[in-house]
Image: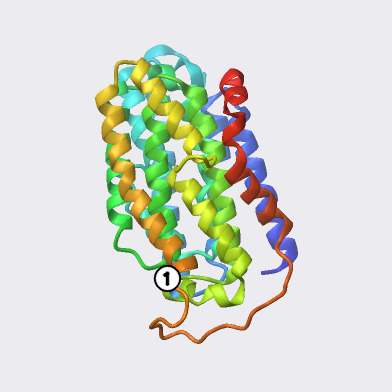
Amino acid sequence: MNPQAKLIFVTSLLLGTTITISSNHWVMAWTGLEINTLAILPLISKSHHPRAIEAATKYFLVQATASTLVLFSSMTNAWYTGQWDITQLTHPTSSLILTAAISMKLGLVPFHFWFPEVLQGSPIITGLLLSTAMKFPPITLLYMTSLSLNPTLLTTLAILSVALGGWMGLNQTQTRKIMAFSSISHLGWMAIILIYYPKLTLLNFYLYAMMTAAVFLTLNSMKVLNLSMLMTAWTKAPSLSTILLLTLLSLAGLPPLTGFLPKWLIIQELTKQDMAPAAIIISLLSLLGLFFYLRLAYCATITLPPHTTNHMKQWHTNKPINPSIAVLTTLSIMLLPISPMLATII
């Protein structure tokens, strides 16, 4: 892709995100979401492969539908209350439509079907943007309207997302699809706590984005697209495989790694809100996710030769590790000890 074109698209992404997260009026928020959608489409379809074109088409249709619903929700609210302010979404029907629209934008169950397919058709770095940066504006809209949303509906969507995200990821062999189902599962954790402690949703999102970025950048450096390629990656870049192992275990939420922190705080808060059954269900369902993270980690580091694979062994490279991978991995592994400080901040 032409560097000037890439610069324009990336700047538009930043602009769209900034407009949405800083707006008070629904029309401005909608404008930011539209700019974001239009800027990411060329990045998805830049390879001109039929699968990439299909992914871009699916992404456009889903996001256009969700944006229409956002406008419809805000207009319904303005019709009944006279308010265009994002925080004044008080009409129950509007809240319901908005929840459906944002769930569609994020890929929460039952509006999740587009996400794994789009991620599979995108390049790895575009997949990283779709999993992290593109989810930030819709999450900020949920954060601003959290007082008006329906707790039962969001809890149901959250539990279904963690269940289906874990269950559908079990049988996958493509790394991008595994990361897509991992994303759906993590969104469930964010959605369940949104009404009771919105800042915890944002903390969870930041930590998730950091760990996911570390995984995607590592996979991109190793040029790994599926599990059979991952099995031969150890001979090429043992240090990157080790980094991948630790980051995946952190994403799974195992102590003493960073990924345990948001899960621990969310379970604690749910228990305080007399939602112990929901906390128990969501914790047990996250074991499904743990299984496929362990499967990835096993393929990356524990399956050493001799083993059966159709892929040729790769030459060992002494190429230095990208500094951003090193920084993100360190943060993904070592932030748990500062959790008391984070708890006081939020």
Considering depth in this image, is 183 or 285 the residue closer to the camera?
285
Considering depth in this image, is 155 or 37 the residue closer to the camera?
155
- Name the kind of residue labelled 1 in the image: Leu
* Residue for point 50% across, 77% down: 232
Which quarter of the rendering shows the N terminus?
bottom right
* Location of residue 178 by image quarter: bottom left
* Residue 203 location (% of width, % of height): 54, 31
Q: Which residue is mark 1?
A: 227
SS for dot 1: helix
Visible residue check, residue 41 = no
* Location of residue 268 by image quarter: top left
Image side of residue 210 versus residue 139, left or right: right
Visible residue check, residue 225 = yes
Please, is residue 253 above or below residue 340 in the view? below
Which quarter of the rendering shows the C terminus?
top right
* Residue for point 38% across, 52% down: 181
- The outermost residue toward the top is 81
* Residue 164 location (% of width, % of height): 28, 48
Please, is residue 204 above or below residue 293 in the view? above
Image side of residue 179 versus residue 2, left or right: left
